[in-house]
Amino acid sequence: MSKYTTMTDHELVVLYENGIDEAFDVLLMRNQEHLFAYILRLTQDTEQANDIFQETFMKAIVCIRGHQYRATGKFSAWLMRIAHNLVVDCARSNRNISQLDEEEKNEILNNNLNFSQECYEQEMLRMADADTLAKMIGMLPQMQQEIVHLRFYEELSFKEIAQITNVSINTALGRMRYATLNLRKMMVDNALELAV
């Protein structure tokens, strides 16, 4: 397997598509921890996260071996999009999704507001220690938690986030804006000072 570890994800996908199973082993090794953490953060349920994790890789295998994979971005982002869609499907079957739809409607209505996202991100990263920030992020609505996680922890672009979450870039930006506003409010409520 060591000869494959220096290859890019795209090269490994091509090899696996052509029947070299070891290439997929490297892809799995590279992405499993990161992907599982992402799914677990969304589901908050280890058993459900395991099921979705397995199903994500099964879908990836079927797609790659069926010559349906198209390299339009990072392989890891493609996996995360599959996982995201499975989490959404699971959530729809387990609860009433109408509350999420209403929040999304509000975000879409306000998605044309101008703001400096880079400034917000830098400010939030400086605002408090990692534990405090993680606790505050955990108090955000689920869709906002996801966007913050993808942006801060996964360091994905808004284009990649939009693809993974299957929304427009404006909706992704809108969700980040609401998350930022909510985090700022939490800081004010808890008398945390922003570093300037």
Image (cartoon, rainbow, N blue to C red):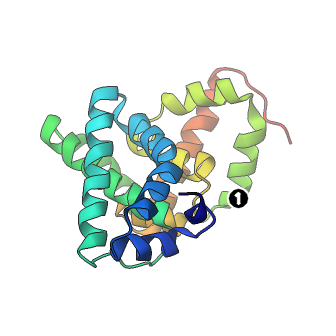
| Residue 15 at x, y percent in the picture | 43, 74
The three-letter amino acid code for the residue at tag 1 is Glu
* 166 on left or right of 98: right
Query: Residue drawn at (45%, 43%), measured in percent from left and top?
Result: 38
In this rendering, the answer to whether 14 lies above or below 106 is below
**SS at badge 1:** helix
Q: Is residue 101 above or below residue 110?
A: above
Q: State the residue at coordinates (45%, 78%).
A: 72
Q: Quadrant of the C terminus?
A: top right
**Where's residue 111, x and y in %?**
46, 63
Which one is nearer the viewer's eye here, 149 or 62?
A: 62
- Where, by quadrant of the figure, is residue 13 drawn? bottom left
Quarter of the view holding residue 85: bottom left
Question: Residue 66 at what x, y percent from top left?
Answer: 23, 74
Which residue is situated farthest in the left direction here? 93
Q: Residue at x 51, y 75 (%)?
A: 11
